[in-house]
């Protein structure tokens, strides 16, 4: 390597308990500088064959362990993630562009919690039993692991979402082949280094890196992988569904959102405004649960808008390592351009950009000026039919519009193809229940946002996905149920 050039981080696949090099690699960028800093294996069919073989060999022993035995391993993994929290948070922030603060306080703690949570929930499931006395029969159900699970995760919450799939799959006795996003592979590779110490037998967790069209499709199409859990975009979900159809695979699809916040005139704005800034711009707006359409009752519209824009301007964009930054860099140059293009389209349609992109100036150190940064942007005077109000932008852009009545706002909130999450702000408890029930969303947070109860179903309606994740839902998904009848 030439003097002055930095060593690149080289990742390897993890198959059958071993790190294995690949014949070709993809560049991975540091979003805060725009520089290549890591090489990710560009795996394909060959690596998937090897991973399937390893997962197949590991399955009989792992699936025969008791839930209690597997629970011990999951708890050890949680301990090891907690012990490596700082190292993992630094890596996640560098790889994804998110602030180090968020990686430390949300991503990595939640990854550890995912293992701890499923370590506990797996030992608490019960099965069903019914009697038919007139026929001298009893019936009961048993659940068995499905087999080799294919797990495909996105780039926005890399370790958080990957472990949210690995933990329930292995807790239920499956072996897994996981494919993280090629844009954010580093923390998944770091996780592999902890598996042996935690007591995960070789072949139980295999991680294969690379792009969706190459290694993702090889995984989804493999006839020995009967179950696929995917989080990501709707077009990719369509492709996965097509490839899975000939094999009748079990599918869980967690997709995007176009999530409304509905703010009634009796809302507590002291709480609502900071929470709605956070729900719009947390993780650079790159969370499928982020708010991107804010409906405000007309009587408080002007006051809300003024205070919301003031609060947004205080949401500092900075280097991911800056402890005073609320937002870091977006994931990639292509994504930054896509997000910016929505703001340009809104402007061309006659909407007003109240702050952020094209209005305010970013201030960044020289080293970060080629990074993928963008200011949090608030758009108003935008029609419900505009692409900014219909399509998932997945960046720091939110639209604010007025409404008059409860009936009207429910109709408008439901008028998009997505149905993932919503927030409702009001001090009228009756209205909260009424509106929450009528919204087409798998998750409704009232007077709060993103408070997670991992026991309960998580997922979306309409184009936001198929299936739910959570204690019982993930268990049901990663197991096959059998009804046994005993005549006595
Ligand atoms: N949870 C969510 O709602 C997410 C939504 N998105 C949305 O998707 C847009 C595009 O982001 P992408 O990273 O391109 O999402 P994506 O859906 O392409 O990527 C998600 C995962 O699927 C894999 N993948 C891609 N094509 C595949 C294929 N043909 N077969 C199997 N696996 C495949 C990717 O490698 C990655 O691991 C974003 O702008 C955002 O709107 C992105 C990430 C997460
Ligand atoms: N699936 C996503 C977020 C999930 C959050 C959670 O389980 O708490 C996403 O942003 O893609």
Image (cartoon, rainbow, N blue to C red):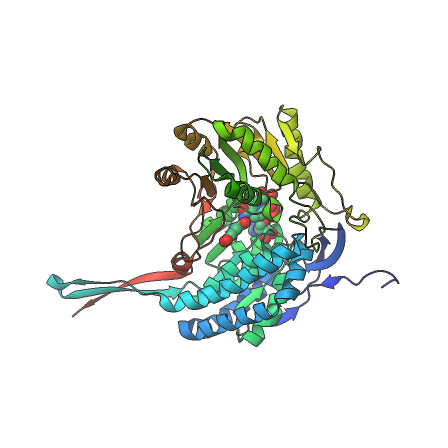
Q: Residue furthest top?
A: 350
Image coords of residue 102 (percent x, y) = 61, 55
- Seen from the viewer's position, the closer of residues 53 and 20 is 20
Q: Position of residue 18 (x, y in %)?
A: 62, 72
Q: Residue at x 70, y 56 (%)?
A: 321
* Residue 480 in picture, x, y percent from top left: 37, 61
Image quadrant assignment for residue 454: bottom left
Quarter placement of the N terminus: bottom right
> Which residue is depicted at the point 46% across and 54% down?
452
Res 203 quadrant in image: bottom right
- As drawn, 406 above or below 284: above
Q: Is residue 418 visible?
A: yes
Measuring from the top left, give residue 46's x and y in whole percent.
61, 62
Whether residue 249 is visible: no
Above or below: residue 405 compared with residue 187: above
Q: Nearer the viewer, residue 487 or 293?
A: 293
Horizontal relation, residue 153 to residue 442: left or right: right
Decide which of 363, 170 is in the foreground and name it.
Answer: 363
The residue at the point 53 percent across, 74 percent down is: 201
């Amino acid at each position: 390597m030439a003097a002055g050039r930095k060593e690149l981080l080289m990742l390897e696949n993890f198959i059958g308990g071993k790190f294995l090099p690949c014949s070709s690699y993809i560049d991975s960028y540091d979003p805060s500088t725009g520089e290549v800093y890591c090489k990710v294996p560009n795996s394909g069919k060959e690596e998937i064959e090897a991973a399937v073989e390893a997962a197949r060999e590991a399955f009989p022993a792992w699936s025969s362990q008791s839930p209690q035995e597997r629970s011990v391993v999951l708890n050890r993994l949680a301990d090891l993630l907690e012990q490596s929290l700082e190292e993992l948070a630094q890596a996640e922030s560098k790889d994804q562009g998110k602030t180090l603060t968020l990686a430390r306080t949300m991503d990595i703690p939640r990854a550890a919690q995912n293992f701890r949570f499923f370590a506990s929930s797996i030992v608490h499931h019960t099965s069903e039993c019914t009697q038919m006395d007139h026929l001298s029969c009893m019936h009961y159900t048993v659940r068995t692991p499905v087999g080799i699970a294919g797990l495909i995760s996105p780039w926005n919450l890399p370790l958080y979402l990957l472990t949210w799939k690995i933990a329930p799959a292995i807790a239920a006795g499956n072996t897994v082949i996981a494919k993280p996003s090629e844009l954010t592979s580093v923390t998944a590779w770091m996780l592999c280094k902890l598996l042996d110490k935690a007591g995960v037998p070789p072949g139980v967790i295999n991680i294969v890196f690379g792009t969706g069209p190459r290694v993702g499709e090889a995984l989804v199409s493999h006839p020995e992988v009967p179950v696929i859990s995917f989080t990501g975009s709707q077009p990719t979900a369509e492709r996965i569904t097509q490839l899975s159809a000939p094999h009748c695979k079990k599918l869980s699809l967690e997709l995007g959102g176009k999530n409304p916040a509905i703010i009634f005139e009796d809302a507590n704005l002291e709480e609502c405004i900071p929470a709605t800034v956070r729900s719009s711009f947390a993780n650079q707006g790159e969370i499928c649960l982020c708010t991107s359409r804010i409906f405000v009752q007309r009587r408080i519209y002007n006051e809300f808008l003024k205070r919301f824009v003031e609060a947004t301007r205080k949401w500092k964009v900075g280097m991911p390592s800056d402890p005073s930054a609320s937002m870091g860099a977006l994931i990639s140059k292509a994504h930054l351009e896509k997000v910016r293009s929505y703001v340009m389209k809104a402007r061309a349609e006659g909407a007003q950009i109240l702050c952020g992109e094209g209005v305010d100036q970013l201030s960044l150190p020289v080293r970060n000026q080629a990074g993928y940064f963008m200011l949090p942007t608030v758009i108003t005077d935008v029609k419900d039919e505009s692409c900014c109000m219909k399509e998932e932008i997945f960046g720091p852009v939110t639209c604010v519009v007025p409404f008059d009545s409860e009936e009207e706002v429910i109709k408008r909130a439901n008028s998009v193809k997505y149905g993932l999450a919503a927030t409702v702000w009001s001090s009228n408890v009756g209205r909260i229940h009424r509106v929450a029930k009528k919204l087409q969303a798998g998750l409704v947070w009232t007077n709060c946002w993103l408070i997670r109860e991992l026991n309960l179903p998580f997922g979306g309606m309409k184009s936001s996905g198929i299936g739910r994740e959570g204690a019982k839902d993930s268990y049901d998904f990663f197991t096959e149920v059998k009804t046994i009848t005993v005549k006595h």
